[in-house]
Image (cartoon, rainbow, N blue to C red):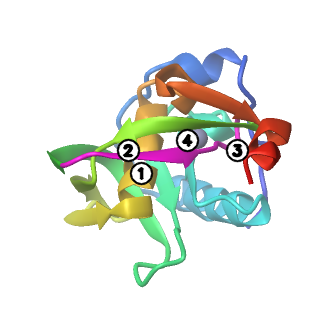
Amino acid sequence: MATRNIVKRGEDVLAKKCRDVTNFDDRLWTLLDDMYETMKAANGVGLAGPQVGILRRVVVIDVGDENGKIELINPVVTMMKGKQHELEGCLSVPGLWGYVERPAKVRVKAQNRYGKEFEIEGEELLAIALCHEIDHLNGILFVDKADQLLTQEQLEERK
Ligand SMILES: [Zn+2]
């Protein structure tokens, strides 16, 4: 495993739509392992392919709950329920946070690293992470959706 460079806002790759993964091979597994290590090293709770410069529909998430590490290949949201409005950040947008409206609960259908289909449901932070990371696969950043953006300084003033 190795950490990869995290692409920052302003680079084209973050604004592009990703293609489906079709090969469930060791190249994919290395990518997933590297993404997880990169996310953990940066203290993140989710990372999507474009954030390491790969335009494929690949996501890793770990919000520190009982699900542990979640790997999503070709994820699709199949159900959304309710609303929540919470503060979000992104490893590709350092130093900026924003309030984004997200569903309170989502269900996502995806494939695992071997190509097997499964479903996962998330509420609270996991619902946010699922939506935030799937947005990345469609070239959308949280700052595109946030109704209020805050710098580190502004965030601290509010405490
Ligand atoms: Zn992000």
Q: Nearer the viewer, mark 4 or mark 3?
A: 3
Residue 97 colored in magenta in the image: no
Q: Is residue 122 above or below residue 142?
A: below
Callout 3: few (<14), some (14-19), or many (20+) C-alpha neighbours within 10 Å?
A: some
Q: Residue 29 placed where, x, y %? A: 53, 62
Identity of the residue drawn at 51% across and 28% down? 146
- Callouts 1 and 2 close, C-beta under 8 Å: yes
Q: Residue 31 placed where, x, y %? A: 60, 54
Q: Is residue 117 visible?
A: no
Which element carries disc 4, helix, strand or loop? helix
Q: Is residue 83 visible?
A: yes
Callout 1: few (<14), some (14-19), or many (20+) C-alpha neighbours within 10 Å?
A: many
What amino acid type is highlighted by mark number 4?
Answer: Gly
Identity of the residue drawn at 21% across and 65% down? 118
Inter-mark Cα distance, 1 to 4: 17 Å
Split into quadrants, the picture shows ligand 1 in the one at top right
Inter-mark Cα distance, 2 to 3: 15 Å
Q: Which residue is mark 3?
A: 91
Inter-mark Cα distance, 1 to 2: 5 Å
Which residue occupies the extreme bottom position in the image? 66
Which element carries disc 2, helix, strand or loop? helix
Q: Residue 141 placed where, x, y %? A: 54, 28
Q: Which residue is mark 1?
A: 128
Q: Which residue is mark 2?
A: 131
Residue 49's disc is 4
